[in-house]
Image (spheres, helix red, strand yellow):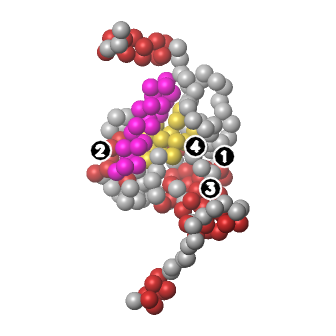
Amino acid sequence: MDGPDARARAAAGRRAAGPRPLPGPAARGGPKERGSTMKVAVLMGGTTSERAISLRTGRGMAQAVRRLGHEAVAVDAADGRLLPAGEEEKAAAVQALKPAGPAALVSAEALREADVVLIALHGGGGENGTLQALLDLAGKPYTGSGVMASALAMNKAMSKRVFEQAQVPTPAWVLLDKKTVASLA
């Protein structure tokens, strides 16, 4: 029998069973003891044009982490402030008064105290390897691509060169810089 009561009983049973391991690829830095509660910093927001969607993504990730029985702390990458649970998207209307650079962000208390960082950033420093490199240097486990993969994914010309070198089939291409485009006009 499916319905609201059945779903509520199932959810209560899952909560009673204790925290479940986070799904997906293992975070860098090594897993905690299986079944223990983790403190997860969900890094979201930021200062790019994709701030609003990052906050929405981060809210969903934080909710999922909490449903699994772990502690989730939402952190705005724009300035390192903590966002209240369930109100992460409201922060989209509030821009950072003092934007923090990636190095300052990695040293923020919420990230230092976290067992793992879930990166919910879109664009810029959240995807280009900068944040990943700083988290690696700080010895902080995180989810997602590492430094090299992140940097390559943001540099399309270098990605094409790597694919060609590895003999991965890739369409013919040409790189146009601003100077070349201006000369064609």
Q: Residue 20, position in %: x, y?
A: 55, 23
Please name whichever residue, 26 or 80, is drawn nearer the observer in this view of the structure: 26
Measure the C-alpha gap from mark 1 to mark 4: 13 Å
Q: Identify which amino acid the numbered label 4 is placed on.
A: Thr
Q: Residue at x 52, y 14 (%)?
A: 17
Residue 123 % position (x, y): 46, 58
Q: Which mark is residue 139?
A: 1
N-terminal-most mark, 1 or 2: 2
Residue at 37 percent of width and 60 percent of height: 49
Q: Which residue is mark 4?
A: 143
Q: Residue at 60% of width from left, 61% of height from top?
A: 152
Q: Which residue is mark 2?
A: 90
Indicate which label's residue lies in the foreground, 1 or 4.
Answer: 4
Spatial CA distance of label 2 from label 3 is 32 Å
Amino acid tagged 3: Ala
Q: Secondary structure at mark 2?
A: helix
In the image, which residues are magenta?
Answer: 52-72
The kind of secondary structure the magenta stretch mainly shows is: helix
Question: How dense is the environment of label 1, judged by Cα within 10 Å: few (below 14), some, or many (20 and up)?
Answer: few
Q: What amino acid is at disc 1? A: Gly
In the rendered structure, the answer to whether residue 97 lies left or right of residue 152 reads: left
Asked whether the residues under the numbered discs 1 and 2 touch, taking CB atoms below 8 Å apart as contact, a structural biologist would say: no
Residue ID for mark 3: 149
Is residue 80 visible to us here?
A: no
Task: Label 4: state its secondary structure.
Answer: loop
Front: mark 2 or 3 = 3
Give the answer, above or below, for where 131 lies relative to 7. below
183 relative to 49 in the view: left or right: right
Give the structural element (helix, strand or loop) at label 3: helix
- Numbered disc total: 4
Q: Earlier in the sequence, mark 4 or mark 2?
A: 2
Nearer the camera: disc 3 or disc 4: 3
